[in-house]
Image (tube, rainbow, N blue to C red):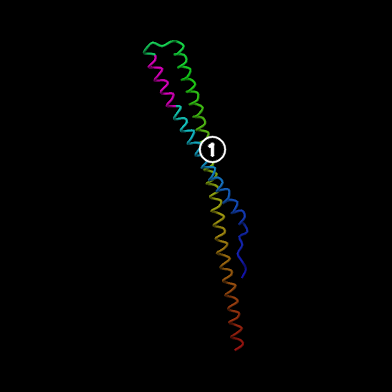
Amino acid sequence: MRKFTFRLESLLKIYINREENVKREIVIWTEKLKKTRNSLLTLTEMHIKALRGLVESQKGKISVHQLISNHDFCLVLKNNIEQKQKEVVELENILENKKNELLELHKQRKILEKLKERQLTNYVAEELKTIQNELDEIAGNSFISQ
């Protein structure tokens, strides 16, 4: 009885390896996205506090220099928030692409696994047929010799 070999086994291993690598990348990009969102939230909170402080300071006496400084700080925070928002969108796009890549690799791996299973089933059926033919031949020979 010969041993079953799947001719595309190396390709299947490559897909499994690539799938695992993409899963690791997704974890990394998800963590980066989480950190960036937290940073965006912190900047937004700082911006809100700065705006409230600016409004509060306008109620009382404040120097023009202090007012300009607070306004400039709010503008810097706003620019940083816009930059972080762009970064979040970019990270979300990268993450979405990685998920699509993972989905495609998963589909390809499943196709190869089904093909392997089908070939194994055919191999087993062929081997059983060969064994049955050999048994029939042995039975026929023993019947003829009697």
Q: Is residue 18 above or below residue 32?
A: below
Q: Is residue 57 above or below residue 26?
A: above
> What SS does tag 1 mark?
helix
Please name the residue shown 57% across and 65% down the image.
122
- Is residue 83 or residue 89 the one in the foreground? 83
Count of numbered tags: 1
Q: Residue type at mark 1? A: Ile
Q: Is residue 4 above or below residue 58?
A: below
Please name the residue shown 57% across and 59% down the image.
116
Q: Which residue is mark 1?
A: 94
Percent coordinates x, y for residue 38 in the rendering = 46, 33
- Name of the residue lying farthest toward the left: 59
Percent coordinates x, y for residue 55 in the rendering = 39, 17
Percent coordinates x, y for residue 131 in the rendering = 58, 74
- Is residue 146 or residue 99 the one in the foreground? 99
Quadrant of image for the C terminus: bottom right
- Is residue 144 or residue 95 the one in the foreground? 95
Asked if the stretch drawn in magenta spans residue 61, the answer is no
Give the residues in magenta: 44-57
The rendered magenta stretch, by its main secondary structure, is classed as: helix
Query: Can you tell which quarter of the image residue 60 is in?
Result: top left
